[in-house]
Image (spheres, grey):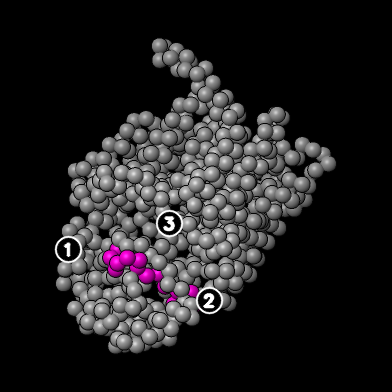
């Protein structure tokens, strides 16, 4: 009884905290926006100031709108539109649109045109209308969302010859190939990834079972593995909100967010760990709603072991997020759904594995980041210091953040105000605290946070919570505006317009590969002809040779191993470097690989200040002046391979 009395005594204090939080919330957001603008001006990040308009202004408008909501007691009722349209009709429409999108991809191989993205927006709208209609079928809707996410993922991974994203896919493919060829885990003397081998075992096993190459196996199985998170997000939201419509909206918005679409195609170790994290969250919350708890607890332990063995640093980040959730549970004080003993088990398990098994990883990777010299002073990144003109043309890519912030802040503010007997307020408070991980803000300019602690990776981890508060915001927005009889059609029109903008911008700019829509489109992939040139290197250039190239090509030949890995003559490993100066070709000793077609199209990323991996990149544009300089310097050295897209040379000092 004494424990219960202590808890009851804490409730008034917690209530005062929550009242203070939701009362000051709109004002604090407005002040934070002003502070962010002043910070960016002070450190000379003018480009960030311009980008900040697309997030700061919607945030301020949302908070002003929220003040009006606070003055009126808004009751939440299910959204019902188009009562006369049957679910079968909308399902048939979805089928027609889906087949049309696949047809467009087949008609334009190796590209994603505006026709394709227009059909994707229509697909999402058809699902949204099903959610907002009477007698919606959650099973059918979830399958449709699952299929859309598969469509968008395969439109990248199976449409291009080798999609590499930000390049981490390539070393993981190499390690998976080595695992498949040898039949056992890679030696810890070669790479720290040997301590976290489940990803490479999974891909290697799929390759052997399906009897296809590792790259094809990875891209084939990655999409459905990632897309199943849709179902877990739905059930997690259902447990928390007990509202089917909000749960379906959460899954829909989650599947259409840019960060989710990006990582759907970029299935690396931290992506698969995110999938298991969502599953683990579902298991943790399911224990509170199921009678037979033992199987769920066993599965939770298995999921924990998987998380420890699949990625090196994801689990500590998840533990931090769970600690924030525990704090939010304490402040809201409407129930304890997260098991404290299990949280302790998670923490002890990963620390034990790091110190007693993966101690070499701890020495080689973690201890380096803890050196005091990195924290002597705050270092600001170069990002955002570019000229404003270079970014104005791509500012439209920030509109999805604008739509997200408008609805998400409304959802957060409403949940904080209605915190009594409402566990969803825990997710609202959690989203408020972790919003700094999800949207552009001044913290992104601090080098220690970006490089040493990789706070940018939290964006994917908190995305289910952000989808939840955004769906709540749409729900509140509808209910507030629909109270006015003269404005019955306004909420639907506004929601459809903003939702379409959110989906279109997210789907286009998540990869930014569409030449018909993006002014400076990216090519985060290698073509078949470029890969043919790389195979020529593997066939005729001996292991241990020095290879100089652009950043993406260097990552293709780079082995993600320890210092002595390149000395192993039994492995086809090259010493991969980046070109630091095109005028020095005649002084290089080794082979030089130049992707001429990509250079002429846009340019290549070379090294700034040295050829080693630690030096920064700079973009060597394919301007007329640079083309002439490149051509003159390449004439000084010997060409040994040539194709319409690529050439290979021997440096002026011969080969090592």
- CA distance for labels 2 and 1: 42 Å
Question: In terms of sequence position, does the residue under pointer 2 or pointer 1 come before the other?
Answer: 2
User: Which of marks 2 and 3 precedes in the sequence?
Assistant: 2
Q: Which residue is mark 2?
A: 109
**Residue 272 or residue 94, whichever sits in front:** 272
Task: Note whether 593 is above or below 300 in the view shown.
Answer: below
Name the residue tied to disc 3: 382
Residue 606 on the magenta segment: yes
Q: Write down the residue under mark 1.
A: 564
| In the displayed structure image, the side of residue 186 where residue 204 appears, left or right | right
Q: In the image, what residue occupies the spot 41% across and 59% down? A: 267
Quadrant of the frame with the N terminus: top left
- Is 454 within the magenta? no
> Cα distance, mark 3 to mark 2?
37 Å
Q: Position of residue 111 (x, y in %)?
A: 53, 73
| Sequence-earlier tag: 1 or 3 | 3
Residue 77: assigned label: none
Tag 1 secondary structure: loop
Report which quarter residue 416 is drawn in: top right
Judged from the image, the secondary structure of the residue bearing numbered disc 2 is loop
User: Crowding near pointer 1: few (<14 within 10 Å), some, many (20+)?
Assistant: few
Between marks 3 and 2 in the image, the one whose residue lies nearer the viewer: 3
Q: Is residue 383 visible?
A: yes
Nearest-to-viewer mark from 2 and 1: 1
Numbered marks: total: 3
Disc number lying in front (1 or 3) = 3
In this view of the protein, which residue sits in the foreground, 359 or 468? 359
Q: Which residues are magenta?
A: 598-613
Is 340 or 139 nearer to us in this picture? Answer: 340
Residue under the point 35% across and 68% down: 607
């Amino acid at each position: 009884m004494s424990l219960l009395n202590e808890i009851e005594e804490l409730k008034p204090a917690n209530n005062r905290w929550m009242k203070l939080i939701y009362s000051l919330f709109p004002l604090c957001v407005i002040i934070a926006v002003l502070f962010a603008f002043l910070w960016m001006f002070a450190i000379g990040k003018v480009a960030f100031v311009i980008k900040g308009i697309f997030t700061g202004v919607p945030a301020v408008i949302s908070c002003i709108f929220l003040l009006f909501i606070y003055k009126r007691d808004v009751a939440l009722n299910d959204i019902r539109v188009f009562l006369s349209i049957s679910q079968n009709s909308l399902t048939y429409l979805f089928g027609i649109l889906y087949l049309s999108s696949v047809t467009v991809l087949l008609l334009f191989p190796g590209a994603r045109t505006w026709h394709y993205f227009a059909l994707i927006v229509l697909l999402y709208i058809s699902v949204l209308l099903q959610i907002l209609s009477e007698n919606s079928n959650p099973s059918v809707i979830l399958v449709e969302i699952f299929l859309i996410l598969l469509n968008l993922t395969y439109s990248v991974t199976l449409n291009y010859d080798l999609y590499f994203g930000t390049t981490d896919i390539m070393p993981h493919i190499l390690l998976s190939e080595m695992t498949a060829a040898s039949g056992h885990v890679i030696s810890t003397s070669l790479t720290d990834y040997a301590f976290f081998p489940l990803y490479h075992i999974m891909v290697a096993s799929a390759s052997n079972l399906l009897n296809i190459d590792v790259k094809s196996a990875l891209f084939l199985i990655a999409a459905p593995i990632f897309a199943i998170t849709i179902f877990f997000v739905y059930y997690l939201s259902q447990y928390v909100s007990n509202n089917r419509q909000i749960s379906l909206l959460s899954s829909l918005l989650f599947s259409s967010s840019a960060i989710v679409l990006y990582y759907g195609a970029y299935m690396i170790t931290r992506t698969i760990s995110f999938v298991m994290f969502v599953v683990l969250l579902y298991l943790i919350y399911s224990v509170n709603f199921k009678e037979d708890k033992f199987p769920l607890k066993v599965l939770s332990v298995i999921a924990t072991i998987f998380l420890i063995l699949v990625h090196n640093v994801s689990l500590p980040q998840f533990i931090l997020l769970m600690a924030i959730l525990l704090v939010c549970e304490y402040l809201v004080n409407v129930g304890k759904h997260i098991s404290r003993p299990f949280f302790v088990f998670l923490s002890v398990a990963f620390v034990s594995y790091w110190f007693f098994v993966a101690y070499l990883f701890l020495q080689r990777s973690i201890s380096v980041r803890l050196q005091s010299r990195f924290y002597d002073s705050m270092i600001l990144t170069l990002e955002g210091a570019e000229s404003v003109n270079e970014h104005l043309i791509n500012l439209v890519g920030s509109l999805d953040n604008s739509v997200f912030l408008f609805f998400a802040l409304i959802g957060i503010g409403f949940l904080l105000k209605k915190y009594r007997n409402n566990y969803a307020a825990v997710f609202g408070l959690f989203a408020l605290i972790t919003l700094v991980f999800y949207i552009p803000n001044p913290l992104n300019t601090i080098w220690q946070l970006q490089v040493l602690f990789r706070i940018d990776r939290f964006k994917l981890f908190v995305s289910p919570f952000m989808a939840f508060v955004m769906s709540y915001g749409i729900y509140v927005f509808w209910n507030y505006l629909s109270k006015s009889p003269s404005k019955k059609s306004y909420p639907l029109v506004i929601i459809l317009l903003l939702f379409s903008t959110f989906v279109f911008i997210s789907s286009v700019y998540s990869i930014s590969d569409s030449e018909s829509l993006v002014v400076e489109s990216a090519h985060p992939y290698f073509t078949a002809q470029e890969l043919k040139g790389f195979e020529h290197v593997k066939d005729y250039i001996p292991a241990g040779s020095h290879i100089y190239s652009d950043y993406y090509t260097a990552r293709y030949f780079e082995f993600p191993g320890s210092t002595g890995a390149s000395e192993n003559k039994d492995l086809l490993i090259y010493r991969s470097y980046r070109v630091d100066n095109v005028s020095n070709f005649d002084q290089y000793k080794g082979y030089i690989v130049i992707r001429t077609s990509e250079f002429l199209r846009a340019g290549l990323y070379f090294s700034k200040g040295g050829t080693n991996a630690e030096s920064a990149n700079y973009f060597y544009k394919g301007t007329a002046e640079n083309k002439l300089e490149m051509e003159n310097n390449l004439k000084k050295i010997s060409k040994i391979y040539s194709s319409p897209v690529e050439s290979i040379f021997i440096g002026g000092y011969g080969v090592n």
